[in-house]
Each structure stands twice: as C-alpha cells, then as structure tokens.
Image: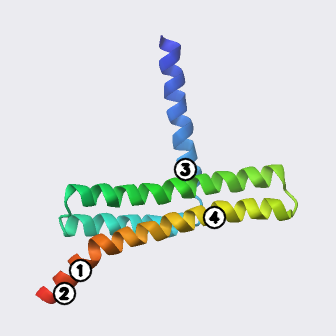
Amino acid sequence: MLSYFKKQFHSFGYAFKGLRIMLRDYNVFIHIPASILALLLSFAFQINILEWISILSAICFVWITEILNTALEKLVDLVSPDRNKLAGQIKDLAASAVLIATIYAILVGIIIFGRKIQEFILLY
C-alpha cells in the first residue's frame, strides 16, 4: 500500500517536471499573459459560472495542446534529428492543433467579453 502512494507521489513529480520544461518554451510568453488577461477580465466583469467554465476550458485547451505540441516536437526531434519532410509535417500538424485551440479561445473571449466591454465603454 505504501509503495502505491510512493509511486503516485513520484508521478506528480514527473508531471511538475514536465510543467517546468513547458515553462521554458518560448510560446509560454504568449500564453501566460493571455491567460492572466482572461482571468483578470473574468474577475473584473464578474462573469457567471457558465462563462467561467468556458473561459477556464478555453485556457486549459490552449495549454494542453501547447504541451502536447511541445512533447510531439521533442519526440520527432529524437526520432528524426535530420531534416525530414514527414517529420516536418508531423510538427506542422501538432502546431496547427495549438492554432485551432488559440482561435477557439479568442472566439470564446470575444463572445464573453465583447459585449461586456462594449457596455462598459457606452457606460462611460
């Protein structure tokens, strides 16, 4: 029983190690400010629970796809260190998943905050 918990504890350690690796990726410097902005706007406009779920889901969707993209890029680099057309296509496909997630997150933000920002501007 103790070894089970020890294994679980170590698996969390590996997950946090993966997050540290991700935080060294240059794309994080786009995702962190965007995530913080979305959260600040959420608090500022006092969005409802469904809007919170949408915003948090969009943020997580982008981060998860970015993590998977980074993992795939590292795997492709390991398996195919030399330039290879198929390896490039795999990287491009993974990057397009992040692009789609990002577009989705932007649309969610526009839908939720667009009207609220417009109302705020008209109020002042």
CA gap, disc 2 and disc 3: 40 Å
Look at the numbered discs 1 and 3 and tell me whether their residues touch, using CB distance below 8 Å: no
In the structure shown, which secondary structural element does the residue marked by tag 1 occupy? helix
In the structure shown, which secondary structural element does the residue marked by tag 2 occupy? helix
CA gap, disc 2 and disc 4: 36 Å
The residue where tag 2 is placed is 121
Q: How is the image coloured?
A: rainbow
Q: Position of residue 55 (x, y in %)?
A: 33, 61
Q: Which one is closest to the eye, mark 4 or mark 3? A: 4
Q: Which one is closest to the eye, mark 2 or mark 3? A: 2
Look at the numbered discs 4 and 1 and tell me whether their residues touch, using CB distance below 8 Å: no
The residue where tag 4 is placed is 95
Query: Would you identify the image quadrant in which residue 98 lies?
Result: bottom right
In the structure shown, which secondary structural element does the residue marked by tag 4 occupy? helix
CA gap, disc 4 and disc 3: 20 Å
The amino acid type, in three-letter code, at marker 1 is Ile
- For marks 4 and 1, the one nearer the N-term is 4
The amino acid type, in three-letter code, at marker 3 is Arg
- For marks 4 and 3, the one nearer the N-term is 3
Identified at 35% across, 56% down, the residue is 56
Look at the numbered discs 4 and 3 and tell me whether their residues touch, using CB distance below 8 Å: no
- For marks 1 and 3, the one nearer the N-term is 3
Name the side, left or right, on which 101 lies relative to 82.
left
Which label sits on residue 117? 1
CA gap, disc 2 and disc 1: 6 Å
Which label sits on residue 20? 3
The amino acid type, in three-letter code, at marker 4 is Ala
Circle 1 crowding by C-alpha within 10 Å: few under 14, some 14–19, many from 20: some
- For marks 2 and 3, the one nearer the N-term is 3
